[in-house]
Image (cartoon, helix red, strand yellow):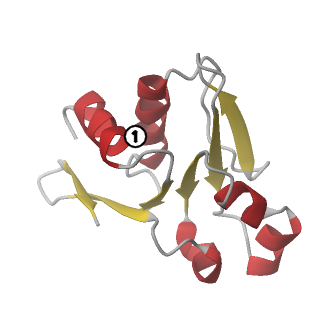
Amino acid sequence: MDDLSSIAQELITKNKKGTLLFNGDMGVGKTTLIKEICLALGVKDNVSSPTYSLVNEYVTLENDKVFHFDFYRLTKEEEALDMGIEDYLYNNNWCLIEWPENIQNLLPLDAVHIHLSILKNGERNIQIK
């Protein structure tokens, strides 16, 4: 994960305003990669994990919206439905989702899965599917 800015730019270029799903253990770098993606998108807000609020809304320099979700604390998919997740996912804006496995049945079929892990040598690995 040495060159996060080029990875972020590649994700943006290949996935125009889509849903990106960030999978990986706690502390593997999901939020760090999301911060880099937001920087590349021109987000002018402070980017932080929405662990307790579930979603943060950011605005880019072009006044586009980027939604950053953290579903770590969700216990039921109904909680995501109650917050209006479907309106976010199908609004033609960027949706960056940490812990997507907690809302697995609600995710768009065309979402991009990004798996982050730490290798035995301590380096980080990113797989995009």
Residue 65 position, x and y percent, is 66, 35
On the image, the x and y values in percent for residue 43 come to 56, 23
Residue at the spot 63% in from the left edge and 63% down from the top edge: 72
- Quarter of the image with the C terminus is bottom left
Residue 30 is left or right of residue 125, and the answer is right
Q: Which residue is mark 1?
A: 33
Residue drawn at x 62%, y 45% is 68
Within-10-Å neighbours for mark 1: few <14, some 14–19, many 20+: some
The amino acid on which the numbered mark 1 sits, given as a three-letter code, is Leu
User: Quadrant of residue 81 in the image?
Assistant: bottom right
Q: Quadrant of residue 7?
A: top left
State whether residue 49 is above or below residue 114: above
Q: Secondary structure at mark 1?
A: helix
Q: Nearer the viewer, residue 126 or 20?
A: 20
Given residues 65 and 21, the one toward you in this image is 65
Residue under the point 85% across and 62% down: 83
User: x, y percentage for residue 85?
Assistant: 75, 63
